[in-house]
Amino acid sequence: METDGFVRRRRMTAETTGNDPGVAGASAGAEVRWLGGRFWGVSESIVGSLTPRIGGETEIQTVDLIRSAQDAQSEDSEPDYEGLPQGASTSTHMLAGAVAGIMEHCLMFPIDCVKTRMQSLQPDPAARYRNVMDALRRIVATEGIWRPLRGLNATAIGAGPAHALYFASYEKLKKTLSDVIHPGANSHLANGTAGCVATLLHDAVMNPAEVVKQRMQMYNSPYRGVLDCVRAVWQKEGPTAFYRSYTTQLTMNVPFQALHFMTYEYLQELLNPHRQYNPSSHMLSGALAGAIAAAATTPLDVCKTLLNTQESLALGSLTSGKGAHRHISGLAHAFRTVYRLGGLRGFFKGVQARVIYQMPSTAISWSVYEFFKYGLTKHQHNKRRTQQMEAEM
């Protein structure tokens, strides 16, 4: 992908532009892009085989033969990251989003396991933890090194298509709404609205995987594996159990994602005003946006976890005139249960683990997504330019 030449041209641009903070930021991240370019060079052939639009063959020899001709072209022909909307196709957004979602959830899964357990309203005495590190240490010591990864396969299966729809719909709606609300500029209203709509599609795919994942993450989970969990839930509670928390999930994720996307885009305006590929700005913006949104929506996440897991100890303590509740259903019921068993503090159980999880999670998601989006767009542009030059020869 001619990474060395691309970094060299970016440095020349930074030197000739003076004190422009956006260009200077791009130059400051050149070394990071160089490392990313090396990684992209290894993965380019794999990515190229995934979608015909990107290209089924790399044509490295052809590119090498005409490299000198490409370097002789003017600086104006070099595409900016956000300067080629026609190059960033829907398939590019979907592929980059799927990779970002899978990496985000897989890398952060052990912390997610801890978060689920720390949100338990009536935890077993052996599953009461002081903090995130204490929880991880005790889980590994008492239940085995692989215990924090139970349910990972269900999450990976759901995260791919869910995030593909999530990012593709967000990018499409963001551009469409921005052109209507604030043509030629960034619109926070468009960003927030696009994030909300994208969440509807994401959660529709991801909610069943969340149910299975969280039930397998709980202490003394009775399920042998993902299929056993799916079969047991289907037989005992019916198919609606996989979407029992969907409305709560949306109630939580719609404000979460609106706040998340608006904060991310606002921070990008401050840290990366020219919207160039700048890994450090993507990572920092994603981390801060995730932390703010996570802290604000923790009470709803506690209710969602209760609806997904249907804690046996919590159900046993909720006695009525006719005995114990069979299950907790609905957001209002979950709110009453949390308040009854934990008071106001109960709504913020696991907030530390949730913020610790979301900061690196959203940083990874945005960094990987922007990296692959940039790489795929650049690859497509170079391939089209190579084909045009070959046709002219």
Image: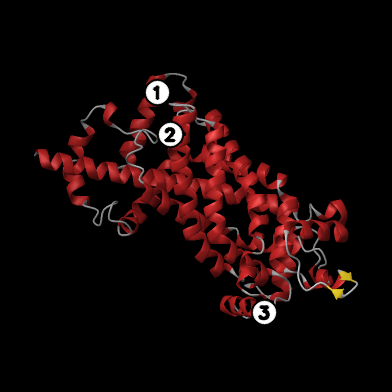
Displayed quadrant of residue 304: bottom right
Does residue 329 appear in this view? yes
Quarter placement of the N terminus: top left
Q: Relative to 291, is 177 on the left or the right? A: left
Q: Relative to 102, is 223 on the left or the right? A: right
Q: Residue beneath label 1, please?
A: 15
Return the disc, 2 or 3, that comes first in the chain's sequence. Answer: 3
Return the disc, 1 or 2, that comes first in the chain's sequence. Answer: 1
Quarter placement of the C terminus: top left
CA separation in Å, label 2 and label 3? 52 Å
Return the disc, 3 or 1, that comes first in the chain's sequence. Answer: 1
Residue 239, given in percent of the width and then of the height, sits at 60, 72
Helix, strand or loop at mark 3: helix
Residue 149, given in percent of the width and then of the height, sits at 61, 69
Displayed quadrant of residue 111: bottom right
CA separation in Å, label 3 and label 1? 67 Å
Label 2 neighbourhood size at 10 Å, few (<14), some (14-19), many (20+)? some
As displayed, is residue 326 above or below residue 382?
below
Q: Residue beneath label 3, please?
A: 236
Does residue 106 appear in this view? no
Q: Amino acid at mark 2?
A: Gln
